[in-house]
Image (cartoon, helix red, strand yellow):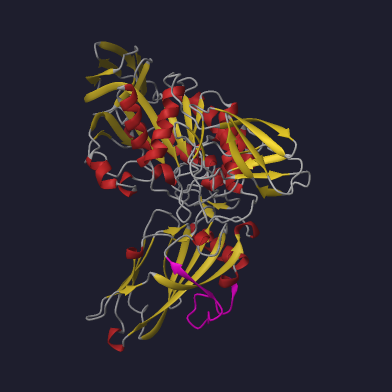
């Protein structure tokens, strides 16, 4: 999962910085397509492009508006408010006539973030049953194509689909979190729901924030200023970029600088350790490691297969790989969701011992060869030669940690983890399409700088609210799930601090909500398969915050204050619903520190609406933490089944 903004960026020749020509733009923006949900109870902007000065008329549900296109060819009208309902038809007439059918007036939600929001419904628990039951004609789905842009785009492609067992998956399986959220909101409100998926795995929040908003924030102004200077320069060429990458590897990686380099088959890796693949390396001996790791594996080829071709399949790799066979480069990629399949041309394979070498750079979150075992295979076009199963033991050697490396060279048009580029390519094209709210599942790729996230996330929210021009719409955040192997003793945790930044955002920014996922993660997979509970918890927050259903219990217990009573600390909570509940035999997840600041596991018990904690050797508690780890054991809930929000009383 990518996490860091590069400070060295090379611009590819031919990068189109200017907007598309007027005659390239659609007469009617694609977001106004058949089967769309349009936002109810708000003046509805409708827009598109045509010949400058051309007259355009829009009619919808008995309402009509007329205008003329401006000098740039853009036209726009606003239609009066319409209540929930439909289906309707909308006709747009002018130099062309377009009729849009099966429209519903309802509530539109943006579903954005990184891979856990992008995670498809085809890869969740009980996927077959869930897909078969996805028959909700009043839930509609729109996927924004993934696009990097260095300037704000005005339009995007895409189309609306009716939610059905086929509509949910055909044309690109929809976001599981988005679907489960929309399903639950529709059930609770009986209002048509439109879901717009605009997400990209492994991305940082800076990429989803506009350049203007970043420039107005002291912490991020130098980053966006530097990026825009490089955009304006446009001087680098492909050869220069490749030279920069080659030099960077030699300067930052021992394996690349070695003689012979580690991909060379004559290099001996006898001292390397072994790792069973596939799987994120964080769960296989490299917990918390971001940086470069080399993998090697050998296989034998019989004499009769000399001179043949083949295919090397390695599955998904997180983040970036460079792959060699017998010292010859056979492929590389930097897209987390892209299965690696590299053709082996003549001259690559040889009789006897063959060496596969894979250099992986991970810039945040899980790293390594993380796909399915069934996807790791070597096939050789040689009669009688059985495919080689590559899942299993590989030799590996960790190189430098990311923090010790210089920023990675990047093309502006080739990587999503650059400031503002996904706002430009995947949010700006929707503006000013009215929405009811947004759900946001992101943060894994910013966990390395949780302090900055305290500023960044509120900045993003304010930015989107100002640009969608739909007021302070509800913005609902999924707090990071538990992940990575458990640790025995209380420790510092970047993921815990990132969760705290998410909590602080909800405390400080009006009309925001938090869906806690601390109990549904998986130690060895950054993508929990239980997306149903995430959707349900987001929907509860929507009912309370967006729909004003005051009696809905939408949050688990939230720490409010601590009182010291001798060698014990008594903790009070809000959002306790029907009362505090412990799932399991005893309450876990608490740690206490005294004056020395050293945290120790605490004994904890529920007493009425409070929790009392103490720890051996701590005579006067100074601070208490709960759920303070990447993957904590914690089991405090309210009676409605919602988990307590992790916290620390010594917040900085």
Q: Closer to the camera, 437 or 323? A: 437
Task: Give percent across and percent down for residue 528.
Answer: 42, 48
Q: Residue furthest right?
A: 595
Count the marks: how many? 0
Q: Can residue 298 be seen in this snapshot?
A: yes
Left or right: 42, with 645 as reference point? left
Is residue 276 located in the magenta-colored stretch of the structure?
A: yes
Q: Can residue 20 be seen in this snapshot?
A: no
Q: Is residue 602 above or below residue 408?
A: above
Q: Is residue 527 above or below residue 62?
A: below
Quadrant of residue 98 in the image? top left
Task: Give percent across and percent down for residue 641.
Answer: 44, 35
Residue drawn 22% across the image and 80% down it: 383
Task: Give percent across and percent down for residue 91.
Answer: 23, 20
Task: Give percent across and percent down for residue 577.
Answer: 49, 26
Q: Closer to the camera, 598 or 381? A: 598
Residue drawn 35% across the image and 86% down it: 351
Left or right: 414, with 376 as reference point? right
Left or right: 167, with 356 as reference point? left
Q: Closer to the camera, 559 or 421? A: 559
Quadrant of the snapshot with the C terminus: top right
Q: Which residues are magenta?
A: 257-277
Is residue 298 located in the magenta-colored stretch of the structure?
A: no
Q: Is the stretch drawn in magenta largely helix, strand or loop?
A: loop
Residue drawn 43% across the image and 54% down it: 336
């Amino acid at each position: 999962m990518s996490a860091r903004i590069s400070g060295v960026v090379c611009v590819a020749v031919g990068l189109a910085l200017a907007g598309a020509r007027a005659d390239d733009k659609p007469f009617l923006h694609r977001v106004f397509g058949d089967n769309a949900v349009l936002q109810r109870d708000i003046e509805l902007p409708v827009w598109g492009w045509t010949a400058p000065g051309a007259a355009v008329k829009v009619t919808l549900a008995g309402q009509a508006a007329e205008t003329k296109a401006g000098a740039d060819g853009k036209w726009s009208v606003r239609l009066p408010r319409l209540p929930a309902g439909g289906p309707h038809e909308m006709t747009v007439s002018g130099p062309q006539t377009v009729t849009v059918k099966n429209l519903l007036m309802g509530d539109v939600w943006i579903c954005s973030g990184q891979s856990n929001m992008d995670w498809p419904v085809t890869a969740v628990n009980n996927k077959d049953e869930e897909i078969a039951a996805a028959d909700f004609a009043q839930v509609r789905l729109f996927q924004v194509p993934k696009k990097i842009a260095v300037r704000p785009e005005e339009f995007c492609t895409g189309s609306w689909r009716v939610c059905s067992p086929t509509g949910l998956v055909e044309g690109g399986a929809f976001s599981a979190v988005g679907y489960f959220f929309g399903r639950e909101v529709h059930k609770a409100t009986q209002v048509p729901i439109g879901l717009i998926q605009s997400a990209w795995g492994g991305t940082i929040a800076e990429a989803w924030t506009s350049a203007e908003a970043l420039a107005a924030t002291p912490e991020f102004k130098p980053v966006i200023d530097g990026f825009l200077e490089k955009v304006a320069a446009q001087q680098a060429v492909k050869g220069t970029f490749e030279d920069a990458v080659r030099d960077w590897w030699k300067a930052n990686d021992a394996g690349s600088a070695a003689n012979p380099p580690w991909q060379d088959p004559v290099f001996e890796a006898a001292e390397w350790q072994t790792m069973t693949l596939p799987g994120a390396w964080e769960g296989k001996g490299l917990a918390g490691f971001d940086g470069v790791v080399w993998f090697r594996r050998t296989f034998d080829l019989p004499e009769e297969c000399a001179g043949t071709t083949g295919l090397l399949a390695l599955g998904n790799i997180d983040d970036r790989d460079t792959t060699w066979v017998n010292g010859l480069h056979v492929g590389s990629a930097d897209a987390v969701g892209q299965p690696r399949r590299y053709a082996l041309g003549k001259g690559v394979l040889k009789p006897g011992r063959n060496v596969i070498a894979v250099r992986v750079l991970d810039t945040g979150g899980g790293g390594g060869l993380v796909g399915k075992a069934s996807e790791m295979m070597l096939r050789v076009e040689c009669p009688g030669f059985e495919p080689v199963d590559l899942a299993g033991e590989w030799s590996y050697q960790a190189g430098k940690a990311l923090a010790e490396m210089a920023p990675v060279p990047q093309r502006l048009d080739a990587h999503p983890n650059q400031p503002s580029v996904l706002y430009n390519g995947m949010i700006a094209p929707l503006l000013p399409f009215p929405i009811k709210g947004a759900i946001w599942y992101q943060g894994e790729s910013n966990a390395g700088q949780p302090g900055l996230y305290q500023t960044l996330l509120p900045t993003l929210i304010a930015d989107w609210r100002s640009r969608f021009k739909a007021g302070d719409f509800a913005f609902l955040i999924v707090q990071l799930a538990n992940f990575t192997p458990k640790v025995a003793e209380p420790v510092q945790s970047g993921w815990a601090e990132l969760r705290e930044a998410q909590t602080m955002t909800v405390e400080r920014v009006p009309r925001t909500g938090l869906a806690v996922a601390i109990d549904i993660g998986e130690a060895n997979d950054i993508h929990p398969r239980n997306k149903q509970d995430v959707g349900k918890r987001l929907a509860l927050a929507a009912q309370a915050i967006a729909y004003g259903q005051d009696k809905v219990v939408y949050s688990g217990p939230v720490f409010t204050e601590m009182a010291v009573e001798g060698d014990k600390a008594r903790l009070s909570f809000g959002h306790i619903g029907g009362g505090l509940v412990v799932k399991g035999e005893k309450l876990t997840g608490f740690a206490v520190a005294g004056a020395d600041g050293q945290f120790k596991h605490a004994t904890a018990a529920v007493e009425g609406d409070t929790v009392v904690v103490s720890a051996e050797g701590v005579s006067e508690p100074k601070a208490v933490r709960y759920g303070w780890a990447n993957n904590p054991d914690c089991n405090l809930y309210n009676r409605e089944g919602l988990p307590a929000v992790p916290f620390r009383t010594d917040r900085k």
